[in-house]
Each structure stands twice: as C-alpha cells, then as structure tokens.
Image: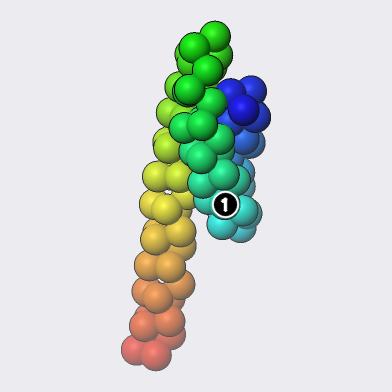
Amino acid sequence: MAVASLVLGIIALVLSFTGGFGWIGTIVAIVGIILGALGRKDPEKKGMATAGLVCCIIAAVLDTIVAIACLACVGAAGVASTMA
C-alpha cells in the first residue's frame, strides 16, 4: 500500500499541472491519502507511506487551488462579457 500511495501521489502531482485533468488528480490524491494512511501501519514501509501521503496531500491542495482559480477566471470572463 505504501508503494501504491507514492505512485498515486506522483501521478496526482503531475495531473495537478495539466489544467483540465485536475479533477482526476484530486480523485487520485484522495485514494492515495487513504492508501498512505493504511500503509503507515507497516513499520517496514512507514517512510515510503509517509512520502506518498505527503505527495498526495500536496497534490490535493494544488488541485483545489487550480480548480478555484479556473472557476474564478471563468466567472470573471462571464462578467466581463456582459459588461461590454
């Protein structure tokens, strides 16, 4: 589970910079967070699970910020088109 969490964290980080696929990155990050939390129970792979957990949390935050920024830009463009 630790390896899966780390892989999902890296995939979620990559997807957070692709713009349109940010929502997929959020889903992947949430699954990775769950797997990272479960993987921390194994003492041999605790470090890798922690790394995956951190990557997934960072990716989830970045995806949320990008989604809010995109919604703000679309909203601003909609308001600007009605004012012209």
Residue at 55% from the left image edge and 14% from the top image edge: 45
Residue assigned mark 1: 27
- Nearer the observer, 43 or 8: 43
Q: How is the rendered protein coloured?
A: rainbow
Residue at 51% from the left image edge and 46% from the top image edge: 30
Q: Quadrant of residue 28?
A: top right
Which quadrant does the C terminus fall into? Answer: bottom left
Residue 1, given in percent of the width and then of the height, sits at: 62, 28
- Nearer the observer, 3 or 38: 38
- Nearer the observer, 7 or 15: 7
Kindly state the secondary structure of the residue where label 1 is placed.
helix
Above or below residue 70? Residue 83 is below
Above or below residue 51? Residue 66 is below
Report crowding for label 1: few under 14, some 14 to 19, many 20 or more residues within 10 A (C-alpha).
some
Above or below residue 40? Residue 35 is below
From the viewer's perspective, is 31 left or right of 57? Answer: right
Amino acid beneath label 1:
Ile
